[in-house]
Image (cartoon, rainbow, N blue to C red):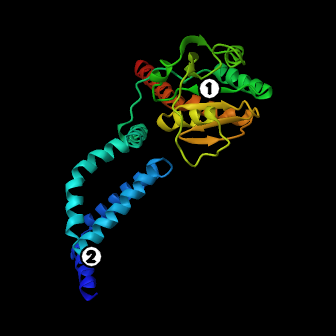
Amino acid sequence: MEKFKQDVYTFFSYLMPKNILITDILEIILIAYFIYTIINWIKDTKAWSLFKGIVFLMAMWIIAELLNFNVILYIFVNAINVGIIALFIIFQPELRRALEQLGRKNISVFQFDFRNEKVRFSNNTVQEIVVACNHMSEKKTGALIVLENETSLGEYEMTGIELDSNISAALLINIFEHNTPLHDGAVIIKGDKIKAATCILPVSDNMSLSRDLGTRHRAGIGLSEVTDAFVIIVSEENGKISIAVNGQLIRNVDEMYLRSRLQKLQKINDVTETRKLTLHRKRKKNSREKKEI
């Protein structure tokens, strides 16, 4: 027993350096944040159970090291190379999602806007979408409407039927009408155009989602997890309207809330355009003053 205690003390003494610098503390904080972020990424997926299994194996490895179980250590050492490759294969969907989320983060230092459009879509588009959603909500017509944000949805457009049509409430209502050729699947909107209908979206594998959510809601959440799209879902069972953004589902929204969220999404580029307009006016004013002088 004393030997075991001495081995434990030696093991942790080896892990803890005698002279800890500020850079060491910073490094520990960064590693802790990195581990915390990874756990948050996978805690609501199927990979969570696999992750707990890996933690259990790591604990077994430490115990084997302390107790000098040579055979078990030999198996661990020879299996680790294959295990690393297996981890990338097993966690491939989660790793891809994590990298996509990381790539969508805005870093202000490197953020430049080269777009010329004043707004993402017009006020008429907002009005037509709200009217269509309210009508389908009253009639309990199931609908799945996706509005493209910064991330391109081209790969999902290709799974449906290309339309490239102007947006109107009547067209959206007609698309999702029961027993029509285009009612099944999602509609993808880019700018003031309906780009495609009957599009297939990735279904979320989030284990914490409510069991009363159907495939339509899970597909909307799934797309919002892997892109920055704004997804509107109208329930066929109760007619209630929900919004999926950044992997989160906001349920039972009313007309006012839906309109405000659409207007917020619409005006993202207004800030950039306002700055351009202000700068243009200042330049014109300066040129006039120079001429007067």
The first of marks 2 and 1 along the sequence is 2
Q: Which percent across, then down, holds residue 53? A: 39, 57
Q: Is residue 16 visible?
A: no
Quarter location, residue 24 = bottom left
Quarter holding the N terminus is bottom left
Residue sitting at 55 percent across and 11 percent down? 164
Q: Mark 1 points at which residue?
A: 145
The residue lying toward the viewer, choosing from 59 and 98, is: 59
In the picture provided, is 239 more to the left or to the right than 54? right
Say which amino acid is labelled 2.
Phe
Q: Which percent across, then down, holds residue 108? A: 40, 40
Say which amino acid is labelled 1.
Ile
Q: How far apart are marks 2 and 1 (CA)?
A: 56 Å
Secondary element under disc 2, as helix, strand or loop, is: helix
The residue lying toward the viewer, choosing from 117 and 184, is: 184
Q: Mark 2 points at which residue?
A: 12
